[in-house]
Image (cartoon, rainbow, N blue to C red):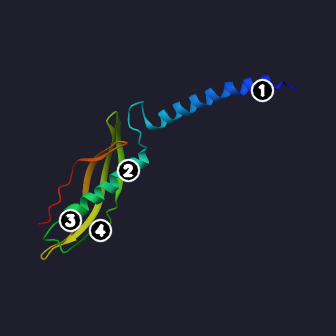
Amino acid sequence: MPSTHSTRRRRTGVVPLLVLLSVTGCLGSFGVPGGPAVSDETARERALTAEERHLRDRLGNASCVDGWGTNSYTGVEAEANVVNRTSAGVYVDVVHPFWYGTETVEADGRSEATYLVTAETTRRLDGTTISPC
């Protein structure tokens, strides 16, 4: 039967190893130290949400628009794909459907945009210009 002293020594040696493995595992999952701490799934979700907000701002604030929405009647689906990871953050390409109606036009469309997602921000770098009026 091992003594209590030797069992305690083995356990305390394992704890630092587990902590080290946990830290390096997290760094490997999310990027290099100091780099983006955002998972692909989170980056995609945040970029899609930001594009929907962009569409809402453009269409909802347009004085000529009588009705609008961000669902699709033409088969275009909202999608987001991570296209690059750098020390600046995660780059995500987004496609998002929309529709709007004015006094003279009923339109269905899709916006395309690229977002830079970091732990703190989600920024639209470029994309489709939407000007219904």
Q: How far separated are the C-alphas under marks 3 and 2?
A: 22 Å
- Circle nearer the viewer, 4 or 1: 1
Residue 85: quarter of image: top left
**Mark 3 or 2 closer to N-term?**
2
Q: Amino acid at mark 3?
A: Leu
Secondary structure under tag 3 reads helix
Residue beneath disc 2: 44
**Mark 2 or 4 closer to N-term?**
2
**Mark 4 or 3 closer to N-term?**
3
Label 4 neighbourhood size at 10 Å, few (<14), some (14-19), many (20+)? few
Q: Identify the mark at residue 59; answer none if there is no mark.
A: 3
Label 2 neighbourhood size at 10 Å, few (<14), some (14-19), many (20+)? many
Q: How far separated are the C-alphas under marks 2 and 1?
A: 47 Å
Q: How far separated are the C-alphas under marks 3 and 1?
A: 67 Å
Residue 91: quarter of image: top left
Instruction: State the residue at coordinates (56%, 34%).
Output: 22
> In which quadrant of the rendered image does the C terminus lie?
bottom left
Residue beneath disc 4: 74
Q: How far separated are the C-alphas under marks 4 and 1?
A: 67 Å
Instruction: State the residue at coordinates (31%, 67%).
Output: 72
